[in-house]
Amino acid sequence: MESKLWRNLIVVLLGATLGLQVYQLYSNRKPPTPSNPPISDVTGDKLIGLEGHPRRGNDTSKIALIEFSDFECPFCAKFAKEISPEIDKQFSTNIIRVFVNNPLAKHKDARRFAQLGLCQPNFWEEYEKLFSNPSGMTCDSESLERSSSQVDKDLALAKSFGFTSTPAFVLGTMETDGRVRPRKIIRGAVPADQFVSTIQQLLKGSSK
């Protein structure tokens, strides 16, 4: 009986010691650093041509905001309906807005909606509707085929930045040849004030 009590006591002590070691191990660990922070700087000499992409804004602007989006993505819809109007309100005369399709494979109709969007005579007038009810839009077969080629180019551009989720944004400065030099990457529908402060920061730098 006494030997059994000793065995039980030893088991309890070993368990307590192991538990203490595990606690110390995890309590001393630092939180993991995100591999892709929401807003990050861009380095390198990559330039983005704007041909074929829907765009609006002041053509003399020194700053461009390029949106990589998916019309079936709920976070993209959130950006379009809640954050995009605030950006337009504050920077409509200061920046160029550019749209790039990045339909994700998991969204079965996203590519078709992307093609329909590119077929519209005025893309930006239909911008919000494309996120809510694009099914009623039409496109002739020739334009649909042409837009399919553009979507392929868009996907290649998104892949070159490693954009595997949507929305994502490239904020950059305009070059004299009309191309954009990326300066910042924004991942996700971050709050409007973060977009505003990041754009203001770049505008301030471009005016020097």
Image: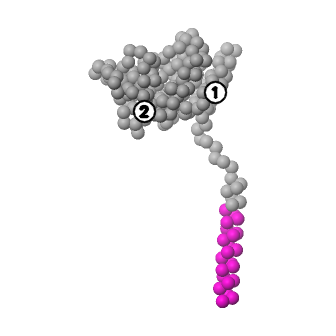
From the image, give the main secondary structure of the stretch colored magenta: helix
Report whether 138 appears left or right of 42. Answer: left
Image quadrant occupied by the N terminus:
bottom right
Where does residue 174 sit, x and y in percent of width and height?
57, 16
Secondary structure under badge 1?
helix
Seen at 58% across and 32% down, the residue is: 190
* Residue 45 or residue 181, whichever sits in front: 181
Seen at 36% across and 24% down, the residue is: 116
Let me know if residue 6 is in the magenta part.
yes
- Considering every residue shown, the one lying at the far left of the view is 141
Report whether 116 appears left or right of 56. Answer: left
Real-space CA distance between mark 1 and mark 2, rounded to the nearest whole angstrom: 25 Å
- What's the magenta region? 1-22
Q: Amino acid at mark 1?
A: Asp
Secondary structure under badge 2?
loop
Q: Earlier in the sequence, mark 1 or mark 2?
A: 2
Q: Amino acid at mark 2?
A: Glu
In the rendered image, which residue does mark 1 sit on? 193
